[in-house]
Structures are given as structure tokens and as C-alpha cells.
Image (tube, rainbow, N blue to C red):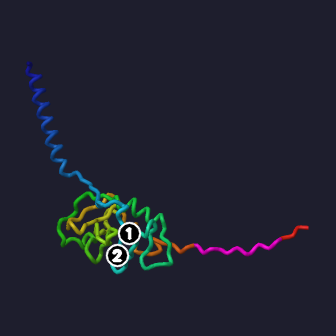
């Protein structure tokens, strides 16, 4: 083997080693995302949303959703679909904090966060999470669960789907229009 070939092989081994060390070092900075909720949408019988002093509860009666305590509004199917298709599939990613003392900084404490409870048909709370608005990344939210004090960022912003306003979830039913009686018309 020639001297130049030996140097080239050693250089190749060194470069490969540096590359693999760099890859291993960079892997610690990657964000691992995982599904926030481990529930099936069909198993959710009720959900409760609370933000500061406002709260709303929606419950499934047979195949229809109703706003608890409100018999004047009909639930909008688009609002329910957005909740089931966007909120229940949200993923968590980057770990932001492990310290419960910093919850207020991320708006996930009891007084500033938006609370969401998912309840099954037997009245058991399946999931309970608190969301907070990110002040620096409007495309994502902060979140913590009742099982884990860690604060994570979500992969997408979903707070706008968690409104406590009854008019976000429901609309007034259209009044039935009574048609005037049709009189017999005689054509001559």
C-alpha cells in the first residue's frame, strides 16, 4: 500500500468518526412528538372547557351533542367536528419546563390556563389537560396534563377550538316559517 493511500484511508476513517460523533450529538436536539390524548373520540361522552371564570360543558345524547344547561341553541356540527378532528389528535413535542413553579409563566396554571376534561359515559374523567397560549410562537400552545407536571409545546395551536362561548358551539334554531294557507284560485 502506498503512503498516499494509507493517509487517505486514515483521513476517511477520521472523517467518518467525526461524522458519527456529530450525528450522535445532534440527536439530543431533536424533538420527539407524541399523541397528547390516548382516547378514542367515540368514548368521549362529555367534555368540559374552563377558562378563568367561564366554563361550558357539551354532552352527547344518543348521536347528538348538546350544550349542558342551554336548551335554546343547537350545536354546530362544524364546531364538534373541529374539536374531535383537531383537538383530540394534537401532539406534544418540545419539553419546555419540568418545574411546576413556572406554570404561570407558560399560562398553564390553574388560574390562567384553559382547562379541558374529557369524560366517558360512566362519568369518569379520562383525560384532564391545561393549555396555555405561547407568547412567542402563535402556531403552537403550551400544555400540561394532570398526570405529568411537565410543560410541552403542542405541534399546532388549538386554543381557538376551546372556546367557552355558547355561541361558538351553538346557534339559534331557524324558526319554522308558516306558509299562508293556499286559497283555491279559480281561473276563468
Q: Can see residue 85?
A: yes
Residue 2 lies left or right of residue 87; in this view the side is left
By secondary structure, the bulk of the magenta-drawn segment is best described as loop
What residue sits 16% from the left and 39% below the top?
19
Task: Give coordinates of residue 174: x percent, y percent.
Answer: 58, 73
Image point (48%, 65%), residue name = 77
**Residue 166 picture location, percent across and down:** 45, 75
To which residue does mark 1 refer?
162
Around disc 1, counting alpha carbons within 10 Å, would you say few (fewer than 14), some (14 to 19), or many (20 or more)?
A: many
Q: Is residue 179 toward the left or the right of residue 150 in the image? A: right
Judge by depth and name the residue closer to the eye, 123 or 84: 123
Residue 181 sits inside the magenta stretch:
yes
Q: Is residue 53 above or below residue 46?
A: below
Asked whether, in this view, residue 14 is left or right of residue 135, the answer is left
- Residue 31, magenta (yes or no): no
1 or 2: tag closer to the N-terminus: 2
Furthest toward the top, the residue is 1
Classed neighbour count for the residue bearing mark 2: other residues with Cα under 10 Å, few (<14), some (14–19), many (≥20) = some
Q: Is residue 39 above or below residue 162?
A: above
The residue tagged 2 is 51
Taking the spot 33% from the left edge, 61% from the top edge, the residue there is: 140
Tags 1 and 2 touching, CB below 8 Å: yes
Query: Residue 123 lies in what quarter of the image?
Result: bottom left
Query: What's the magenta region?
Result: 174-184
**Residue 124, located in which quarter of the rendered image?**
bottom left
User: On the rendered structure, is 34 left or right of 60?
Assistant: left
Q: Nearer the viewer, residue 155 or 170?
A: 170
**For the N terminus, which image quadrant?**
top left
Amino acid at each position: 500500500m502506498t503512503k498516499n493511500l494509507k493517509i487517505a484511508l486514515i483521513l476517511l476513517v477520521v472523517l467518518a468518526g467525526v461524522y458519527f460523533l456529530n450525528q450522535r450529538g445532534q440527536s439530543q436536539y431533536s424533538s420527539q412528538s407524541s399523541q397528547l390524548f390516548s382516547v378514542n373520540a367515540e368514548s368521549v361522552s362529555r367534555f368540559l372547557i374552563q377558562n378563568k371564570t367561564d366554563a361550558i360543558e357539551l354532552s352527547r345524547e344518543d348521536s347528538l351533542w348538546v350544550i349542558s344547561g342551554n336548551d335554546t341553541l343547537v350545536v354546530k356540527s362544524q364546531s364538534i367536528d373541529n374539536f374531535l378532528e383537531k383537538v383530540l389528535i394534537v401532539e406534544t413535542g418540545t419539553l419546555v419546563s419540568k418545574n411546576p413553579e413556572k406554570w404561570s409563566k407558560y399560562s398553564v396554571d390553574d388560574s390562567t390556563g384553559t382547562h379541558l376534561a374529557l369524560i366517558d359515559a360512566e362519568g369518569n374523567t379520562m383525560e384532564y389537560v391545561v393549555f396555555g397560549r405561547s407568547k412567542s410562537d402563535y402556531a403552537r400552545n403550551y400544555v400540561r396534563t394532570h398526570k405529568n407536571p411537565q410543560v410541552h409545546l403542542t405541534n399546532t395551536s388549538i386554543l381557538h377550538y376551546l372556546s367557552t362561548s355558547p355561541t361558538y358551539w351553538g346557534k339559534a334554531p331557524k324558526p319554522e316559517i308558516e306558509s299562508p294557507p293556499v286559497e283555491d284560485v279559480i281561473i276563468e
